[in-house]
Image: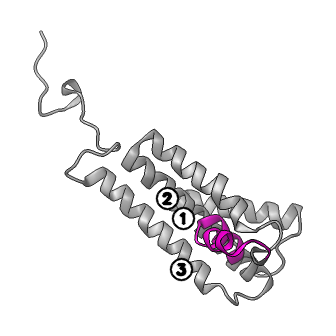
Amino acid sequence: MILLSAVAGACVYLVGQSFLGALPHQGLADWAALTLTVFAMAATGAGLVALWGAPGLGIAGGLMVFVGNPFSGVSSAPELLPDAVRRIGQALPPGAGANLLRSTAYFDGHGASGHIAVLVTWAVVGCAAIALGHHAPIRFAAHQARPASRNPAVQTAHP
């Protein structure tokens, strides 16, 4: 997931810089901001899938796309949103990631620490949910029982 997030961040950076010219200077910092944003969203999605299966994917998609994007204020500025909406948007990865990228690309990283903390928190909680879903003694969606025929300890000889 880390490698794919890094590749996705590089691809988004290359499109944003090469074709659009929207990300001046700070190439490494911009790539790192994009990578962390993708990783935070991917870890959250994978963690919810590990815990709840397919419904977790729907929850993650709905949270990131239908709540996170409109509440992020990316198309204008978060300050133009109502206060409660702005706070929710900045506490979700799309809002924090967009403002982290804005901080690194245009303001030399000033004001980035809060956005980094939000993204790292989502990434850590997502990774913890993945581990819990796969290794917990209780049966989560990712911890399904294997059929007896595929379990090597239970295999029997067939004539």
Point out the tag, 3 or 1, that comes first from the N-terminus: 1
Residue 63 percent across, percent down from the top left:
58, 55
Identify the residue shown where x is 65% and y is 68%.
Answer: 89
Mark 3 belongs to which amino acid? Ala
Question: Taken as a whole, is the magenta stretch helix, strand or loop?
Answer: helix
Give me the disc on residue 50.
none
Residue to which mark 1 is pinned? 40
Q: Is residue 91 magenta?
A: yes
Asked if 159 appears above or below 122 in the picture, the reply is: above
Three-letter amino acid code at the position of disc 2 = Thr
Disc 3 from disc 2: Cα separation: 15 Å
Give coordinates of residue 110: x percent, y percent.
70, 90
Name the residue at 53% across, 80% down: 117
Left or right relative to 2: residue 145:
left
Graded by Cα atoms within 10 Å as few (under 14), some (14 to 19) or many (20 or more), the crowding at tag 1 reads many
Quadrant showing the C terminus: top left
Task: List the residue tagged with mark 3.
Answer: 117
> Which secondary structure, mark 2?
helix
Q: Nearer the viewer, residue 8 or 114?
A: 114
Residue type, label 1: Ala
Q: Is residue 75 left or right of residue 155?
A: right
The residue pinned by badge 2 equals: 44
Label 1 to label 2, Cα distance in Å? 6 Å
Of 10 and 98, the residue lying toward us: 98
User: Do residues under tags 1 and 2 come within 8 Å of each other at their CB atoms?
Assistant: yes
Please say if 152 is above or below 59.
above
Q: Position of residue 68 (x, y in %)?
A: 64, 61
Q: Image check: 41 left or right of 48?
A: right
